[in-house]
Image: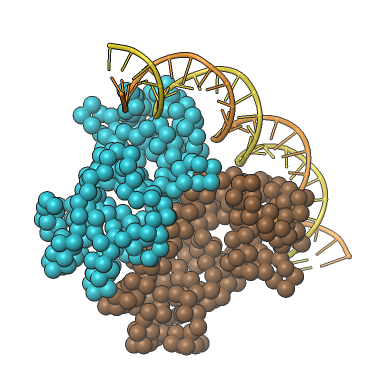
Chain colours: A brown, B cyan, C yellow, D orange
DNA sequence: CTAAAAACATGATATTTATCAGTTAACACT
DNA sequence: AGTGTTAACTGATAAATATCATGTTTTTAG
């Protein structure tokens, strides 16, 4: 196992920063690091998790399979995010699958370390609570978006979301490249519909593409579209 | 102010049960009780909340207004549920409105009491955290439902949800009577569509109605419909 | 008790979105 | 480099859902 948690910069971005020196030490001693290849699962819907996963590198999609065989992607998690927290806290099996969107490196932290700290360190618990409150707010927003906005609006929103959260590469394309299918699963629509809208946006000069990469050309117009103009 | 929190049965249903005697005493001394008439707001989207509201009686809808002027109801909260927690914890203004669906009685608990306990009593914090983890899971489920199920399926699900969570009255109708508009806002559809589907379900013998009241006649078939048969 | 308002209901139609079928382009591999 | 495989794309069509118009019933306020 390479570096120690105490020195891990990523920790700054998540609730682990509220841990004391000793607690971190314990986590560091019990953690294991794992690489996950693109397309491989970190865990799957229904699994009983024995700990949480802290993302060091790469991006994971958190999704749920529906009766008709389609996935809905509920969240995209990248560097610094902790996966499986909800499940460990409520001591239920997880309701989501976590699958690597690109090659990943994650640290597994056994639930004992987490539960222990949750019981003893109110600051940590409060920090986790704040994070979860934030996630809940975002989930509410997603609900309203899905039910009130058209597919076109949600597509526009998805591109802006990807830009804001994952940035752009050297050539100005979205740094996180998703397959068309993944995009449709984020937006909650049929893959063909997503592809059609991409073509349409391209024609209208809102975006440009290069292979599966997508670049934003007219942010203002996309924003207006999201707002419903 | 009538009864004291220490004696309040409702407390058993929410995270306040993890409070110590003294903490409860403090809450009891600082709380105020308020009645809210049907249709009146407890708080509205964007409000900065100075505390949380514990529901003693009645039902509140938590909803968010979208750009096109339609509400989306994210949750229905009844006896024992605590409203505004998320906002107080993350110290942001609330993203939802809480409006009384019928006459209500709620206790207002100033945020100081809550924050104080959050910092000092890890059991309480953990209890709140567990609740929020549960809410988050439910929110994820709603996202998947809305995006993967048809309006008909979601309507069927809504009726079953109302039955499971609010029960039936003496005549076997759903105990919680919502307007057709509210139903459509729970399901995330146009009011006319909701009404049409109610008519259809009635014709098929799945439900029966009496005025705006709705009764479930064929639970099995409704369940099958939700599952997609 | 009655007028006005609000909620409920239904038909006709338009729009959005999904599905099915098929083609083309990208990629992976021995 | 050739071939098999998967993902991207496009068109035609069907299905689901929203919208508009309008009438009816129920509730509310004076």
Foreground residue, B168 or A229? A229
Count of picture labels: 0
Horizontal relation, residue A60 to residue D3: left or right: left
Q: Quadrant of residue D12?
A: top right
Q: Residue at x 20, y 29 (%)?
A: B170
**How far across and how far down the image is residue B214, in percent?**
33, 29
Foreground residue, A46 or B209? B209
B117 over B228 or under it: above or below:
below
Q: Does the rendering let one see residue A116?
A: no
Q: Residue at x 41, y 75 (%)?
A: A15
Foreground residue, A131 or B83? B83
Foreground residue, A82 or A148? A148
**How far across and how far down the image is residue D15, in percent?**
59, 31
Q: Residue at x 34, y 27 (%)?
A: B212
Q: Quadrant of residue B205?
A: top left
Q: Residue at x 44, y 39 (%)?
A: B185
């Amino acid at each position: 196992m390479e570096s120690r948690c105490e020195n891990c910069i990523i920790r700054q971005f998540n609730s682990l920063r509220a841990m004391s020196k000793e607690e971190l030490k314990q986590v560091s001693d019990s953690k294991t690091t794992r690489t996950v290849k693109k397309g491989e699962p970190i865990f799957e819907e229904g699994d009983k998790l024995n700990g949480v996963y802290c993302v060091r590198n790469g991006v994971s999609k958190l999704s749920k399979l529906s009766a008709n065989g389609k996935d809905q992607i509920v969240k995209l998690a990248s560097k610094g995010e902790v996966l499986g927290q909800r499940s460990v806290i409520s001591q239920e099996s997880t309701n989501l699958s976590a699958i690597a969107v690109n090659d990943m490196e994650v640290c597994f932290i056994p639930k004992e370390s987490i539960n222990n700290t949750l019981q003893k360190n109110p600051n940590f618990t409060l920090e986790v609570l704040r994070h979860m409150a934030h996630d809940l707010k975002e989930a509410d927003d997603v609900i309203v978006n899905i039910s009130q906005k058209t597919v076109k609006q949600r597509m526009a929103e998805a591109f802006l979301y990807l830009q804001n959260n994952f940035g752009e590469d050297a050539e100005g394309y979205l740094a996180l490249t998703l397959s068309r299918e993944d995009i449709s699963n984020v937006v909650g629509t049929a893959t063909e519909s997503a592809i059609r809208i991409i073509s349409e946006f391209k024609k209208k000069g809102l975006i440009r593409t290069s292979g599966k990469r997508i670049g934003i050309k007219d942010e203002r117009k996309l924003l207006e579209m999201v707002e419903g103009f």
